[in-house]
Amino acid sequence: MGRPTPTSVIPAGSPTVFVVDDDASIREAIQGLLKSVSLKSEAFGTAQEFLRRKRPDGPSCLVLDIRLPGINGLEFQHELASAGIQIPIIFITGHGDIPMTVKAMKSGAVEFLTKPFRDQDLLDAIHLALDRDRQARQHESDLAQVRQCYATLTVREREVMALVVSGMLNKQIASELGTSEITVKIHRGHVMRKMQAESLADLVRMATKLELPSEKK
């Protein structure tokens, strides 16, 4: 136990549950449970072993023991966040207390389960964590697509887009930029086409994702 499953065994896009616990019997029990509901898993005895494993393309979550050799779970949670590794975490522990639970949940943990816990409670938490990771991955994918479209805009088209989503009319934009209304209409058409926006509301949503101003000052 504790050795990572070869990457080739896990189909691209398939959910993976990582288990980090220094108790081999706990790792085996959790992996057996996950196998019974057709969930792929990989188990590690230390946080360092997990860090050496590159995350797969599909959604994933981490079942993490709060007490580990060398570093505790809360410290590891902070270390992952500092390194920009976004993965939903479910804490398991035999020595939990309320302050520890509160700290873990405030730092973004999905659940904090005290051993012995019900199998269904763990499975429910895992499904919630995987759904959360799917949503995060979809958001990142959508944002990347919007950024790719935005990168195709010229400087003037970006100026027009910013003014359009701020609520300005074509004639106001023309006045602001010192150009003609017909030119603004042409640039606006280019923006809509390049951004693949079907409506002004659609363009505003994209601007929000890009953190462009969406209200007239």
Image: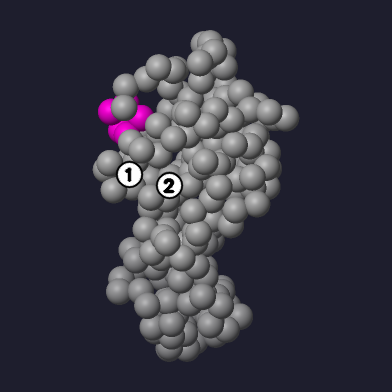
By secondary structure, the bulk of the magenta-drawn segment is best described as helix
Region in magenta: 120-124
For the residue pair 42 and 162, the one nearer the viewer reads as 42
Asked if residue 61 lies in the magenta stretch, the reply is no
- Residue plotted at (51% across, 75% down): 148
Q: Residue at image x 68%, y 28%?
A: 69
| Colour scheme of the rendered structure | one colour
Disc number placed over residue 92 in the picture, else none: none
Q: Is residue 131 left or right of residue 210?
A: left
Identity of the residue drawn at 52% across and 41% down: 1
Mark drawn on residue 41: 2
User: Relative to residue 42, is residue 107 drawn left or right?
Assistant: right
Q: Tell me which numbered mark, 1 or 2, is placed earlier along the sequence.
A: 1
Marks 1,2: beta carbons within 8 A: yes
Q: Which residue is mark 1?
A: 35
- Is residue 134 among what the camera can see? no
Separation of marks 1 and 2 at Cα, in angstroms: 8 Å
Residue beneath the point at 27% across and 43% down: 37
Is any atom of residue 98 visible in this view? yes
Vertically, is 84 above or below 156?
above
Picture coordinates of residue 94 (x, y %)?
51, 16
* Element marked by disc 1: helix
Q: Nearer the viewer, residue 105 or 177?
A: 105
Q: Position of residue 139 (x, y in %)?
A: 43, 57
Q: List x then y, in percent, for residue 149.
A: 48, 77
Above or below — where is 22 with respect to 156?
above
Determine whether the residue tagged by mark 2 lies in a helix, strand or loop.
strand
* Above or below for 180 versus 17: below
User: 86 or 70, which is in the foreground?
Assistant: 70
Q: Residues within 10 Å of mark 1 (few under 14, many from 20)?
A: few
